[in-house]
Image (cartoon, rainbow, N blue to C red):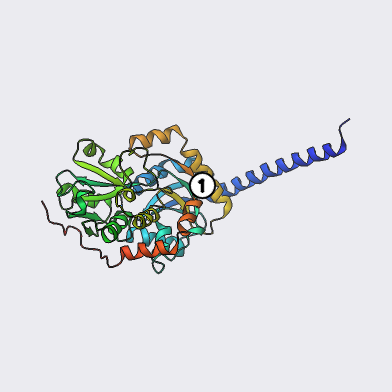
Amino acid sequence: MRHPHRLVFALGLAALIAGSLSSGSARADSAADFYKGRTLTILLGHPPGGSYDLYAQLAALHLGKYIPGHPNVIVEHRPGGGGGLAAAYLFSKAPTDGSLIALLPENLAGVQLLDPKRGRWDMRKVNYIGSFSDSNSAYGVRKDAPATTIEAMKTTTVNVGCTARTSASAQTPVVAKNLAGMKFNMICGYRGSAAYMLALARGEIDMIVMNWATWNAKLLDQVKAGEYKLIAQTGLERNADLPDVPLIQEVVGDAKVGAVLRFLAGGDPIGRALFGAPGVPQDRMAALRAAFDQMVKDPAFVADAKKRHALLSPKPGAKLDKYAEAILKTPPEVVELARTGMSGYQVNCPGCGKKK
């Protein structure tokens, strides 16, 4: 005869499981009701042509099929301020009902600490959906530049192109210039990676610091041919594709500057990630996270990414919070040194470099 306490426990467990399944089904039904016949917008802070756009366009083609209700998915560009204008919109004016998600810079938590007046957002409150790939950036120099190694650039000036002063294309070279004495002449103000890639090809600039995913998608043939040489990379760890390219903090030769460079690279493991605005209902966030996790395992999505030369090392949204938290726990003295390293730096007009 079954023990009565065991019977009660078994019945209770069955009821709990049934209730959980019912609750999950109700959440999915609620999300489906919301997204059915609706358009989901992916907000970008950069113009078309770079790695942000690359992954956003992939998501626009594939994500909707896995979201309950199957919304139409589109991409909206709000370029400016290295993604800062779009971030400000997301945290202040964007809808919080789940109809808009974003793919914005991985360094927003760093900007929040470095420039609180500008970074008026709280990255602790974002709802991460998932990351497509890490975002290590590679320092790439033309083969006929005045200097083609980090060591030579300690004594020989090279022109470095970038977008906004708080962008990933500017932050680490500016700090290396101001704190480690690198001879980098910063020529910034280019409107996106496509613009400074063109300037690099024309010889207006000698070097760019660009996301490895964009190098891989746009300029891999030129790298393989030796037209451009990758001499350093950002990140907390070397990218698996670039095992022989040193981290910039490994070659600057100063421990305190290295700590600053690691702080600035703290968002690289977050990479190209989708997230929602604070306040998105949890049933919709759960649906978006589940949809992302399914999408990145879809053979059709993986094949499309490969066709577009889009690198994939996906992470679920639940694992991304810790990276932003770690950045926001950076010791104040490291943040202050980073702020010093970026002070006095002005954005110049694009094309100011002397053509060769």
Asked if residue 323 is positioned above or below residue 293 in the image, the reply reads below
In the image, farthest residue toward the left: 356
User: Which residue is at 42% across, 40% downward?
Assistant: 313
Q: Is residue 116 left or right of residue 345?
A: right
Q: Quadrant of the N terminus?
A: top right
Is residue 119 positioned above or below 157 on the image? below
Residue furthest toward the bottom?
117
**Which of the pair 149/35 is nearer the observer?**
149
Q: In which quarter of the view is residue 240 placed? A: top left
| Residue 126 x, y percent position in the rendering | 49, 56
Three-letter amino acid code at the position of disc 1 = Lys
Q: Residue at x 58, y 53 (%)?
A: 282
Pinpoint residue 31: horizontal percent, then vertical percent. Answer: 56, 49
Residue 64 seen anywhere in this rendered image of the structure: yes
Residue 139 locus on image (x, y percent): 27, 48
| Badge 1: residue crowd in 10 Å (few <14, some 14–19, many ≥20) | few
Q: Is label 1 in a helix, a strand or a loop?
A: helix
- Tell me if 11 is positioned left or right of 64 in this view: right
- Residue 288 as seen in the image, left or right of residue 162: right
User: Mark 1 sits on what residue?
Assistant: 319
